[in-house]
Amino acid sequence: MTEQQTQATRPQTTYIKGDFVLFRDVERFWLGKPGHTFVGRVERSWQHADTGKVLYDLTELSGNGARAGVDPDYMRLLPPADAMYDIDTAPLTEPDSGAMTPAAVAWLTQHIAQASSTLPAAS
């Protein structure tokens, strides 16, 4: 595969502050070392003075460490829809809450508690 073909298949994504991403420490990956893939939150983007490439500074969520100058070729967006899938697909018609995942039950419990606290008092 030529370099031009490889670049054509790479996703061209622009990340914004607050996006959650999966990123890979490519050196650790190619050396076969463990702990090469992390979840991070985008803190800022900037353009490298020499290459002109946009790089990202991330907060690594597992240890709250900073990662500077992450190449977007080794980042993938973690969409909110994926994080909320279990709640969005919870079987609300099931009488048994055991059929729902714990995350769905927790969200529904919190939502019900918040909704009941906002209802007007009975007259």
Image (tube, rainbow, N blue to C red):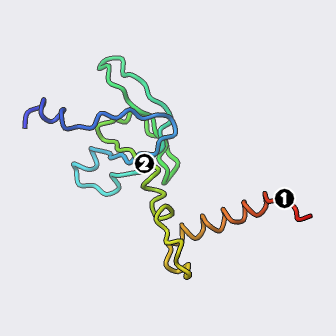
Q: Residue at x 55, y 82 (%)?
A: 96
Q: Which element is circle 2 on? A: loop
Q: CA distance from mark 1 to mark 2?
A: 36 Å
For the image shown, how many numbered marks are present on the structure? 2
Give the residue type that dot 2 points to.
Pro
**Which quarter of the picture shows residue 120?**
bottom right
Looking at the image, tell me whether mark 1 or mark 2 is earlier in sequence order.
2
Give the quadrant of the C terminus: bottom right
Q: Position of residue 85 (x, y in %)?
A: 45, 60
Q: Label 1 belongs to which residue? A: 120
Q: Position of residue 61 (x, y in %)?
A: 49, 50
Q: Nearer the viewer, residue 82 or 116?
A: 116
Q: Is 68 on the left-hand or right-hand side of 28?
A: right
Q: Residue at x 46, y 56 (%)?
A: 83
When the figure is inspected, residue 26 is found, relative to residue 110, above or below; the finding is above
When the figure is inspected, residue 30 is found, relative to residue 58, above or below; the finding is below
